[in-house]
Image: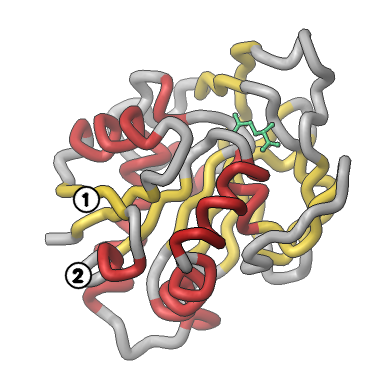
Amino acid sequence: MAVIGILAVQGDFDAHSKAVGAVGERWKLVKKPSDLDGVSGLILPGGESTTFLKHLEEEGLAEPIRQFARTKPVFGTCAGAILLAETVENPAQPSLGLMQITVRRNAYGRQLSSSIRTLTAEPELSEIGPEAGTPMEAVLIRAPVITAAGAQVRTLARLQGDPALVRQGFLLAGTFHPELTTDTRVHRYFCQIAAQVGKSSSVSPAEHK
Ligand code: GLN
């Protein structure tokens, strides 16, 4: 059975652990590099990406996470998606640079920035689970927007036309907070990817679609 690691240096890791538990998967908190041992997929939660960067540096976690992502799935939500992006704007800042996406931070303005909106899910996502076909609610909290995506990136859900959930191989990034609603589709989807990759660990990342 897959064990999902949840980066727990900052942000809403607690809500993610509940969401992973709700889809019946095991999880463990990741606070230092050795916590990645035995983990089959890693969630980078929302929070504040600049603070995450500081903690990743302090704990020596950035490079181990980069290495982890070469062979195992990583799912970044909101600040986590910012960490995964190759290019970060507003303002520019460093990142793990793992996905071919450009994100603009705090794209929905300062105060009017937290809201619940409805996502348009692509069929690949809506086929999962009992909520299939129903609209998916997206909680946005000072959310980034994905402004560009490379050829290897597929869009799984959109928000007002912009990509809101994207996948590149076995890496997943969402601009919203699926851990804050009762809709478990996105976590179930990620856990499924982790289970598949775990079974076929000889397959290279590029071959995972
Ligand atoms: N605005 C935050 C950042 O730029 C992200 C907000 C979130 O994760 N909810 O890092």
Q: Residue at x 19, y 36 (%)?
A: 21
Residue furthest to the front: 58
Q: Nearer the viewer, residue 53 or 101?
A: 53
Check disc 1 and give the amino acid type.
Answer: Lys
Q: How many marks?
A: 2
Q: Residue at x 15, y 40 (%)?
A: 24
> Under tag 1, what secondary structure?
strand
Pointers 1 and 2 in contact (C-beta within 8 Å) = yes
Q: Quote the CA–CA distance across marks 1 and 2.
A: 10 Å
Q: Which mark is residue 38?
A: 2
Write down the quadrant of residue 50 in the picture.
top right
Q: Measured from the top left, where is residue 165 in percent x and y?
A: 60, 43
Q: Which mark is residue 48?
A: none
Residue 112 sits above or below residue 15 on the image: above
Residue furthest to the bottom: 202
Local crowd at mark 1 within 10 Å, few (<14), some, or many (≥20)? some
**Left-right relation of 77 to 163:** left
Write down the quadrant of residue 59 in the picture.
bottom left
Please name the residue that numbered disc 1 is placed on. Answer: 28
